[in-house]
Image (cartoon, rainbow, N blue to C red):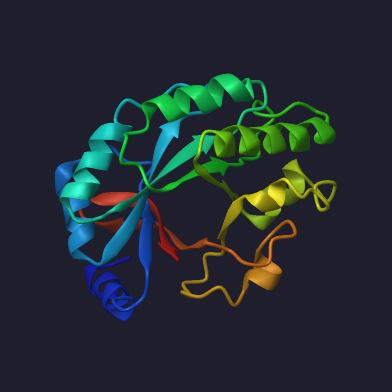
């Protein structure tokens, strides 16, 4: 996206709630400060990768965001059902700053390295991970897209009351800042989403960020 179009986009959402998934970039104070100046009021940073390794830069990014006036910082956890729910939730919780007030988003990706073959076990794992974070007093959500969710979870989790405890962040890269498309672009049995990635791979503030997000 060129700078003129990006400026127009950010002006258009000045009165809306604009967030950014910046989990893919090398964090810098300059970039985060710039995002804050462009009406971004919420950012998502990766805190745990597919191996369960804690991202030591999360705290630095959290501080950058707060200094930039971005007071909601979410934490992304890539889900791998080979990891124990108790160990993963404990490690992530310990790495969060005391003033963390965002959501821990469980990012569901479609990779055979992240999941066992048994879909029932996948659902059970997600349920237990949600409960593990909730028991630690944290808000928790699921971050995925319709195609990935169908491939990884399918329809078997449709009746899970535990999954419904989680918030939902979906993806539909249609450049529309609303949830009106959730009935067909969403997934699972959620009816009220919290976040929507509406544009991916946006070059802004000296970096190619993963996505712009409406909330």
- Name the image quarter holding residue 83: top right
Residue shown at the point (66%, 21%) measured from the top left: 82
Q: Quadrant of the N terminus?
A: bottom left
The percent coordinates of residue 181 (x first, y second) are: 62, 74
- In this picture, residue 178 sits left or right of residue 74: right
The percent coordinates of residue 8 (x first, y second) are: 27, 78
Q: Nearer the viewer, residue 139 or 60?
A: 139
- Name the image quarter holding residue 204: bottom left
Residue shown at the point (62%, 50%) measured from the top left: 166
- In this picture, residue 79 sits left or right of residue 62: right
Q: Nearer the viewer, residue 131 or 12?
A: 131
- In this picture, residue 138 sits left or right of residue 156: left
Q: Is residue 27 visible?
A: no
In the depicted structure, whether residue 183 falls above or below residue 210: below
Q: Is residue 71 visible?
A: yes
In the depicted structure, whether residue 124 falls above or below residue 155: above
The percent coordinates of residue 119 (x first, y second) are: 82, 35
Residue shown at the point (31%, 79%) measured from the top left: 15
């Amino acid at each position: 996206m060129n700078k003129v179009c990006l400026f127009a986009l950010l002006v258009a959402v000045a009165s809306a709630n604009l967030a950014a998934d910046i989990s893919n970039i090398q964090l810098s104070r300059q970039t985060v400060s710039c995002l804050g100046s462009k009406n971004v009021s919420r950012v998502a940073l990766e805190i745990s990768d597919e191996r369960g390794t804690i991202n030591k830069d999360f705290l630095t990014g959290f501080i950058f965001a707060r200094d930039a006036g971005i007071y909601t910082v979410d934490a992304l956890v890539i889900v791998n059902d080979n990891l124990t729910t108790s160990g993963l939730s404990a490690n992530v919780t310990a790495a969060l700053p005391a003033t963390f007030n965002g959501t821990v988003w469980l990012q569901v990706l479609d990779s055979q390295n992240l999941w066992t073959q048994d879909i029932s076990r996948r659902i059970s794992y997600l349920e237990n991970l949600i409960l593990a974070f909730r028991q630690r007093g944290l808000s928790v959500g699921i971050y995925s897209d319709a195609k990935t969710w169908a491939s990884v979870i399918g329809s078997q989790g449709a009746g899970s009351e535990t999954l419904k405890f989680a918030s939902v962040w979906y993806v539909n890269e249609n450049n529309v800042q609303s949830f009106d498309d959730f009935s067909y672009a969403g997934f699972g049995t959620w009816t009220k989403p919290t976040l929507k990635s509406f544009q991916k791979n946006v070059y802004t503030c000296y970096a190619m960020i993963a996505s712009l997000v409406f909330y």
